[in-house]
Amino acid sequence: MPGIHAAKAVRDRFLSLHSLFLARKSKSVPTDILLEEYDAAIDVGRRRLRTAVRRVQKVYPLYLADLGSACLALVMALLLRYGIAELHARPELTSVLLWSGAQYLIVCALVFPLCGLYSRNWRYGSISDLFTILRAVLLTSLLLVSLLFFSTRLSDMPRTVVPLQSLLLVAFLSTARLSFRARDISLSRSVFKVGRNDTASGDHLIPLLLVGASDAAELYLRALARDPNCPYVPVACLDKTEEQVGISLRGVPIAGTVEDFERVVAQLQQVKKQPRHVVFTEAPAAFGEAASDNLLRSAENLGIAVSRLSQLTELKGAKGDNPFELRSIELTDLLERPQATLDHKAIARLVRGRRVLITGAGGSIGSELTSQVAAYGPAELVLLDNTEYNLYSIDLTLSEDAPEVPRRSYLCSVRRSKRVEELFERHRPELVFHAAALKHVPMVQMNSCEGVLTNVIGTMNVANASKKYGALAMVQISTDKVVNSTSVMGATKRLAELYCQALDLDGLEGGSGPRFMTVRFGNVLGSSGSLIPLFKRQLARGGPLTVTDPSMTRFFMTIREAVELTLQASAYGFEKQLGQGEIFVLDMGEPIKVIDIARRMIRLAGFTPDQDVAIKIIGCRPGEKLFEELFDETDKRIVSPVPGVLGAVPEPVPLPKLKNAFLRLQHHAERGNEPAIVEVIRDLLPRYEHSPVAKSKRAVGEKRARPPAQKTSLKVPAANSAHRAKQPRSPLLRNL
């Protein structure tokens, strides 16, 4: 700072020289003061010269290239003026060229640094910086003309040479500066063309649909192209008006207006480029309130996440001491597939005007289920949860988001049959969603008795109360851990599936009673106790991120998508009486490696895997398998008419046998007799492989040969479904 103030003082004194000269003429300024001002002027000149020399030293290749360009421009100007033949015929022109070239080279060597050609970062040069080049060329040309006038009176230099060499020099200097932006030149080509993410590395890119084709969109596209690790690829733009439709913005086609959103998405889907993210490059209000609202609703129906770019002028507080402060991560970005589309009308017909009871209402799945059900206008919501804070949180959320929906919240453990029956008798729910469960595999493995009491006995209590008090339907939330289970958690949820299946078939046999439907799906991103919150905590600490095995794969969904498809499957199953005795299996696409999720999360947070943040392999935990499946070896796979849902028919177990076994399980669990529990489970599930807690290094599932990669999209002959539709009664009833 002192140096800056001193330089300003010298500059001010130098600028006052004119007034000092006038004062000197009037004999009012002493000679020593005038000499002091001359010294100041010399000091300013020295400072500028030193600064110019330092700048030239930093970019001396560019400086030498500029001097060569000046000489080349003069030579080419003479060639254009005279031609090669005349130059050969007039040898005196060579001496003119050497004399004028030497003078011009000296002028350029002095003027270019002083004009600021080396005082800016040309990597970020713009049109305004072109005036710096024009100023330098104009000044050097005037000085050259002046020198030639005083030395030769311009007798040997044609008048047209100087303008020609000036134009050529401007072109040469501009081209040299443009080379600094060679990486950006590709921005004008179709680097974002539709085929960009067809490469192997492009398989992990997230397709974006930009809303807005203005300056903000252009800057965003420029930033995307400059970032080699960017996980996003824009596939199309929408604009406010039709003026730009049909052209492209930095290689991204402007495919339509905001009103054309659904049409553009359908077209992109046909070429397998369906966007998984919609990005507003401007405030949604800029596109019109009605148009923006319609687009948001359409995106929600299509399962597409919507975001908005932050304004470049927004100011945020500086980061603290933690260099791993997380950027916001959209869970949908971790999946390599678009979200499923929904039939909202069918869900509304199921929920609207009915009394709905939800167990585990404060949990990860339960809270999302509660919020979505409340949006469809139920007559009453009854919320049950065993955790006080979770129940308080979801009740508070409903009071803010859906205050018009009547609701009651109860602390209740589904293990207590009398408490459950008391609440069912009081409210007489018509729809029951059973989301209460213990789901953390290692925890349930270490506390198997508690897992049996909650997952098995709790489900039995809720199902019995649903049947006793006249519910229309009960929907149970299940998990892919039930398939060929090696954990207590998976086995207990499998028993819960079998119990609901038996009750559903029993109602079909008797011709009355509620529907009992089970919806099975894999891991949900972001749920409590899942890997995403764990990765976020580890990433916030700077790593490492812990992965059990490099080969471990899982099926993944977002919580919202899982709940939406659960409601859709329930609506179709109840309204059209589909899937009696079946399990609804949500279509979750291909299994994903957990280590790939970890790497993707690190990249989305703005870091580089294995460089900025390490990944540590810790080995499988008790009860875990290297891979999960959606269908058990004993399941019969069928095609479900429900969009986004598959069907599985387990081998049924007679209802009396299940009730008797459940009573024994309850007896042993209440007394903490774990070996007896395992024996009862094995009696009901002969293929169950119990994984003792002590064996924590490798998963039991690793003993079996890994099957081929399982896809959830199945193709079964249509005749199979037609045959089932003709039968008024399920063939499974013969097994009961």
Image (cartoon, rainbow, N blue to C red):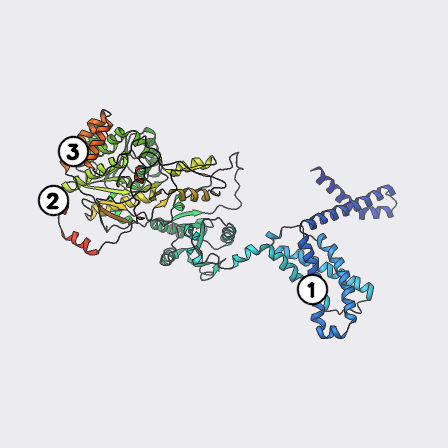
Cα distance between the residues tagged 2 and 3: 19 Å
Quadrant of residue 671 in the image?
top left
Seen as rendered, the residue at the extreme top is 671
Q: Quadrant of the C terminus?
A: top left
* N-terminal-most mark, 3 or 1: 1
Query: Is 470 left or right of 488, judged from the image as shown?
Result: left
* Residue at the spot of label 3: 659
Of badges 2 and 1, the one in the foreground is 2
* Mark 2 and mark 3 residues within 8 Å of each other at the beta carbon: no
Q: Secondary structure at mark 2?
A: helix
Instruction: Give the residue number, with chain letter if any, for mark 2.
Output: 734
Instruction: Judge from the rendering whether residue 664 lies leftward or rightward of residue 181; answer left or right.
Output: left
Q: Secondary structure at mark 1?
A: helix
Instruction: Give the amino acid at mark 2.
Output: Arg
Residue 514 showing in the rendered view: no
Neighbours of disc 3 within 10 Å: few (<14), some (14-19), many (20+) = some
- The N terminus: image quadrant: top right
Residue toward you, 464 or 287: 464
Residue 277, image x, y percentages: 41, 49
Residue identified by numbered label 1: 73
Q: Amino acid at mark 3?
A: Lys
Circle 1: residue type = Ala
- The 10 Å Cα crowd at callout 1, few under 14, some 14 to 19, many 20 or more, is many
